[in-house]
Image (cartoon, rainbow, N blue to C red):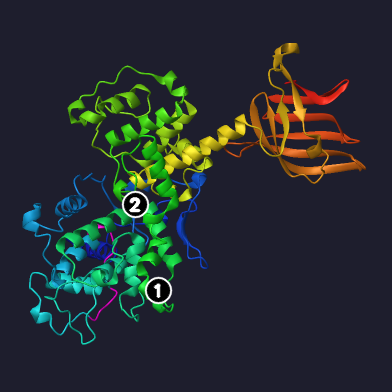
Amino acid sequence: MNKKLLWIFFIATTLLLAFPAKAEIVWTQIWTGDRRLKTDTVTKIITPVLSWSTTNWTNITTGTVTNTGTIIATTTPITYTGTEFQQSLAWMYANGLTKYNNETEYRPEDGLSREEAAKIIGQAYIKLGYNQDTKNTSCGFADSSQVDPTLANFVVDTCKRGIFKGTTDNKFLPTEKLTRPQAMALLVRVFEGKVSNESRTPRWGDYYIKGQALGLTTLNNQTAFDSNITRREIAIYIYRFKNIVSNETIKLMMLNKLNELGTTNQTFDTWTLNNFGSLADSLSINNDPELLAAIRWMNDNGLTNFKTIQEYKPFEILNREQAAKILYNFWEVFKFMGTQNNVTANCVFKDVSDIDASLITYVEQVCTYGIMNWSDGYFNPKGTINKSQFIAAIIRFFEGKKLDETTIPRRKAYFEKAQDMGMIGPADAVTFENPITRYEVALFLYRFKVKYQILQNMNNNTIQNQIVSTVPWSIKTGANNMLESNVYVDMNLLQNGNFDVGYIEIFNQRYKIVKSNIKEYFTDNFERFGNIFTLDTEVNTGTTSFIVSDLSLIEWTIRIGESSTFNITPINNTNAYYKITKTK
């Protein structure tokens, strides 16, 4: 090989080594539009900022966002069964945090040494996608010779990453038992990416309150908390932690809760120290009134057998056969009629033997009504159901049909409809294709139920500030096959030139009217203009104008969209009601 070729090879190799390919995808490379996590400098509230119209959704589901803003590639989560500890142990074994998959061999009631904890938590740190930047270079402990050689690297690595700290005399104390406060400090440091205020009395005060707010510990007694942790407890702590950080919506919510808590650099008084539990509980999901109301409503209507937040296990992932039961019972509550138009008889599954016998009927029903999809004859009952799939099922119930699924992303129309109805918010776009948690299921269904009831009430009953109401039984077909009817008009509202918002009900459909302008000609003589909005989505769907002269309505024009126009005019010899005619 000549010298020229050697130099080219050397330069190319040098450039490749200088700029290695990274497995990590930076957050700002996912979206082409407005695409970042935003922290309010005053309130400290964290929100994702994005735009549906400018978003490139191609890579949104490629990974999980860490607290550093890095996306780490992930796979579809596996659903674990059994008690919380059994699920915790199964997850730890599957992900290499322990070599034991048997409870007896794991020794759940034994204590855990600090060097053993360094290995378990250090491996969890990496498995959950946190970056491995060095935050601390002073990790040469005076008692490093006492560390088990097989665990020495874990001790040093967790120190470098700011997870573990030594004593004031630079000792790690590898064989000492890990305490509950220490375990909580390790996990909270990982979650926040920083050390909390440790100048308290007790030193672990911040960590205890934050651990309570995160739901990692439910102990309300300081004495009980300030003791050694068992191997059973550390497994459960880590599993609960995993369920939080692996769901971006819940993670953002919890980060906001800690920001609201704002304990750092504040002074603890005696009352606070004696009431750690009640203080943290006020921020904990275990006392979320909306979630509790949702669970109780679900229980009342057969959607769940549980009545409390703790029993409901809100952070667990829902599988497809469980979703089938919840969705079918949800349909039973409201009896959505439109779904009966989508009946299919092709609901025989090749994996029917894998379906829980008590859930087969529900699976067949949601298939029959076209609410849940399947692939190649397989229902995949134990597989997870994504948030987007669950939301799509609810919207299909409500609409009685599928929305446009040819968009990119496929379920964009369902997201927008659910957002219009107040079921979800912009933050849910980040995790819209992630497996749904039971927490999200409860809130989505309950919020839909509340909004649905409000809309039904607004469409069926007279409401405050209703200006126009159709006279019952007066609707008929008039000239040119156009609808006409008698209507009541509230002249007291019309005569008020400063009136801003009202409602009209024409031909059994209700709209909101918002004043846009008013043109006065003489005293008590004016024309008023307004915009018309749909009730369910608050979309501007038309315009209106009416003329009032000497406290009487002369003419009212209502335009809905581009194709429907209505005129309201007086009826001779009566002021009791007016006539509305569709003219276009």
How far from the left and from the top, in percent, is residue 322? 29, 36
Amino acid type, residue under disc 2 in the picture: Asn
Residue at screen point 40% across, 74% down: 272
Q: Badge 1: how crowded within 10 Å, few (<14), some, or many (20+)? A: few
Given residues 119 and 21, the one toward you in this image is 119
How far from the left and from the top, in percent, is residue 336? 46, 26
Given residues 142 and 490, the one toward you in this image is 490
Residue at screen point 23% across, 44% down: 79
How far from the left and from the top, in percent, is residue 221? 29, 68
Above or below, 144 against 31 in this view is below
Whether residue 406 appears in this view of the structure is no
**In the rendered image, which quarter contains the N terminus?**
bottom left
| Region in magenta | 126-138
Magenta stretch contains residue 47? no
Above or below, 364 against 99 in this view is above
How far from the left and from the top, in percent, is residue 523? 93, 43
**In the rendered image, which quarter contains the C terminus?**
top right
- In-image side of 420 versus 558 (left or right): left
Q: Badge 2: how crowded within 10 Å, few (<14), some, or many (20+)? A: some
Classify residue 107 by image quadrant.
bottom left
Amino acid type, residue under disc 1 in the picture: Thr
Q: Which residue is mark 1?
A: 272
- In-image side of 541 versus 10 (left or right): right
Q: Label for residue 247?
A: 2
- In-image side of 392 versus 514 (left or right): left
In what element is the residue under mark 1? helix
Above or below, 97 against 177 in this view is above
Given residues 521 and 33, the one toward you in this image is 521
Above or below, 263 against 531 in this view is below
Q: How many marks?
A: 2
Query: Which of label 2 and label 1 is nearer to you?
Result: 1
